[in-house]
Image (cartoon, rainbow, N blue to C red):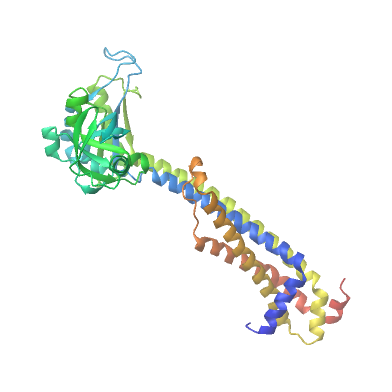
Amino acid sequence: MFNTDLWNEIFQSINKNKLRSILSGFTILFAILIFTLLSGISNGLQNTFSGFFSDDASNTIFLRSGRTSKPYKGNQTGKRINFSNEDYEYVKHKYDDKIQFITARVYKNFTGSYKGKKNDYNIRAVHPDHQYLENTKVVYGRYLNNNDIDKKLKYVVIGRLVVEDLFGNKNPIGKQITLQGISFQVIGTFEDDGGDNEERLIYMPVTTAQSIFSNKEYIKEIRIAYSPKMNYAQTLAFSKKLTEDFKERFSVAPNDQRAIRTVNFAERRRDINQMTFVIGLMVIFIGFGSLIAGIVGISNIMVYIVKERTKELGIRKVLGAKPGSIVMIILLESIVITSIAGYVGMLIGIGTLSLIGDSLEDYFITDPSVSSNLVVSAMIILIIAGCFAGYLPAKRAARIKPIVALRND
């Protein structure tokens, strides 16, 4: 197999029959290229869906207030439902055995400034547990604690991009920034896997925001991390029970879907997993369809090659070539063409994904990379298919009597 003369003969045959070799290789190249692109796009979609949960605890439930869409028990359509600290305490104590972490949220948008530098920032007023619900990574200093909540301290924890905007390379810990004309002390900085939007945030104690900027009891939403010991059915039952309790608590119609809303990450994750599974099946179906097309193409070409070389094979037999060596030459030629074309197709596919990867984010495709092992496996499948495709006609041709082969047109 490692005979130098044999390999020289194979490459001479490929070089002599350029068109035939190019057509054979193009079939393989195109099949691997399509397979690589589809696999990369599938991975990109899965990365996007997975990214929806990258910066939040996976066992999260949101409890949000809205407006009534139906009249019920004296409440008119369009009435605003407002949560308060009392509702937060109600959930915290009533469902203590089911809750791992809990926080309220109040949202604001203010201009923050420090020594002439300023920018607009989203403010989230929260409880200390919010750090774990949001998977916030404290880089310097510390996060909010219960003492900050109890004493309504004017403390803030600022994101990485807020630090860059206002402080540059300076350490912001202990410095005072101004929000709405009021000074707040920076006690910590953080990073977040959620990206730039999440790192351009400012966190402060919820009680501080309530006492300075809004109604002293108002909260926008309650966010819960349920116990990780709960299974999927239990989490659905828990979120359903929360919704029913709050609808009853605020005299909201049971079939009103707007006034009280719960978002269960477990349910969303299930839906997304189902979606990615379906997308994966579709990509596998189309991808393997392209491989099958490649297999059919290389098979037809191999049959043609063997038929075209029947007279040549007859001459080889006259000169003393053994049937096994004739079959080996054809198979090795097939393997060489398939391997080179498949490798080139893989490189083009990976290069294309790398080149256009960033532009695909607008289509919810993030980092559309592909495993080289997967593509190599597809190439091996095509090589094996090419061998099988060439083996049978080559074996038949090797058995033809020389006189018959020489007469073949």
Which residue is located at x 67 percent, y 68 percent?
337
Which quadrant of the view contains residue 232? top left
Q: Is residue 152 visible?
A: yes
Q: Identify the residue at the far front of this view.
A: 116
Q: Nearer the viewer, residue 65 or 293?
A: 65
- Give the x, y percent position of residue 14: 73, 71
Horizontal side of residue 182 vs 395, given as left or right? left
Which residue is located at x 86 percent, y 73 percent?
408
- Give the x, y percent position of residue 149: 14, 35
Which residue is located at x 17 percent, y 30 percent?
208
- Give the x, y percent position of residue 195: 37, 44
Horizontal side of residue 242 vs 31, given as left or right? left
Which residue is located at x 14 percent, y 37 percent?
148
212 w.r.t. 354: above or below: above
89 w.r.t. 326: above or below: above
Which quadrant of the view contains residue 8? bottom right
Quarter of the image where the C terminus is located: bottom right
- Give the x, y percent position of residue 159: 29, 42
Q: Is residue 230 visible?
A: no
Horizontal side of residue 295 vs 119, given as left or right? right
Q: Nearer the viewer, residue 222 or 108?
A: 108
Q: Identify the residue at the far bottom of this view.
A: 320
Q: Nearer the viewer, residue 83 or 240?
A: 83
316 w.r.t. 50: above or below: below
Quarter of the image where the N terminus is located: bottom right
State how many labels appear: 0
159 w.r.t. 380: above or below: above
